[in-house]
Image: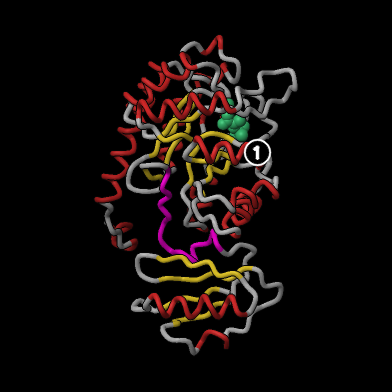
Amino acid sequence: MLIVMKAGATQKDVERVIETIESLGFRPHSMPGAGRTAIGITGNQGSVDPAHFENLPSVADAIRVTKPYKLISKDLRPEKSIVKVGNATIGGAELAIIAGPCAVENAEQVFSVAKAVSKSGAKFFRGGAFKPRTSPYAFQGMGEDGLKILADVREQFGLNIVTEAMDEAGVDLVEKYGDCIQIGARNMQNFSLLKYVGQTRKPVLLKRGLSATLDEFLLAAEYIMAEGNYEVILCERGIRTFAAHARNTMDLSIVPAVQRMSHLPIIVDPSHGTGRNYMVKPMARAGVAVGADGLIIEVHPQPEEALCDGAQALTPIQYLELVRQVTAIYEALSLAEENQIEFNTKEAIVA
Ligand code: PEP
Ligand code: MN
């Protein structure tokens, strides 16, 4: 059930609805929006009787939700969510660029990339201290020491830190040192981990699972939000298909598909989405053109020596050129949207 408040509802009216939901033993999720506040209800097994709410002050409507998701949905919040990450935002008017190495290897490597990222005007820095590697013998990440290097990057460059946690202990550490908790593709359906990050108050970058459908992806976000953390950013990072010319198949059509159903921002990852250095820039351009709210890009000072994902890493110079190009595309798109022509279909056809 979803309770939609009238435009002029006071805080007291909203609180009355929240108390009613709690008195029924359910959980309220209040989502203030530009035009109205809506309150989602979770924790109910069967349907909730709308009569509990219909006569409360300033309640416009009590709507039954028939879809499997409630909180990610545009029904709850028709306008786009803007997620605050450190001192910047994702999902607003600016294209968000998150860049940095796949893995934190040492301070020198990280700082040389951070310099380029800062110079590019990006506001977010990435780098894994806990790496989910296919082989147990591959470099697993520097752990807490790596997070300390990332915290130094924030200190020196003012960049906001996005970094992966693979388990609960990792979440506690990322909360301490970072600005945004990344949940990797392999953990997209680690439901207990999703619930755990849902209880933190740090934004979460949720990457799409290797073979996740749109519904599975959105329901993973729903897990986080159902715990009370509404600061979720989705990330398309490519899925497994029969195609062997790239590491993954970057599924760009999921961007408009998500935007049709959800208020959550979605970014794309052309680095993991392709796995090939030469494909990163063209697919980043495509990601921006399709309407993504941002990009996450892997950069390494010497890709051939990277301890992780070297084949898809851009050099700092290649990265700066990518930012130049995607910025131009983003600006052209914003301009095109501003100047949108309202076509009367019939007139347009006969003209
Ligand atoms: C990463 O961002 O370095 C990473 C491991 O990504 P994914 O979970 O998408 O594979
Ligand atoms: Mn990587």
Kindly report the secondary structure that dominates the magenta region of the rendered protein.
Answer: loop
Q: Which residue is depicted at the point 47% across and 57% down? A: 263
Q: Which quadrant would the C terminus be assigned to in this image?
A: bottom left
Occupied quadrant, residue 343: bottom left
- The residue carrying mark 1 is 169
Spot occupied by residue 196 in the image (x, y as percentages of width and height) = 64, 49
Spot occupied by residue 108 in the image (x, y as percentages of width and height) = 46, 13
The stretch drawn in magenta includes residue 79: yes
- Which range is magenta? 71-85
Q: Which quadrant would the N terminus be assigned to in this image?
A: bottom right
The quadrant of the picture showing ligand 1 is top right
Q: Is residue 290 left or right of residue 206?
A: left
Depth order, front residue of 350/211: 211
Q: Give the tally of numbered discs.
A: 1
Q: Is residue 231 left or right of residue 91?
A: right
Q: Which residue is depicted at the point 70% across and 45% down? A: 190
Residue 297 can be seen, yes or no: yes
Q: What's the amino acid at mark 1?
A: Ala
The stretch drawn in magenta includes residue 43: no
Vertical arrangement, residue 347 with respect to residue 144, above or below: below
Q: Which residue is depicted at the point 38% across and 16% down? A: 317
Vertical arrangement, residue 227 with respect to residue 328, above or below: below
Spot occupied by residue 66 in the image (x, y as percentages of width and height) = 63, 71
Q: Is residue 303 left or right of residue 336?
A: right
Spot occupied by residue 334 in the image (x, y as percentages of width and height) = 30, 45
Crowd rating for badge 1 (residues with CA inside 10 Å; few <14, some 14–19, many 20+): few
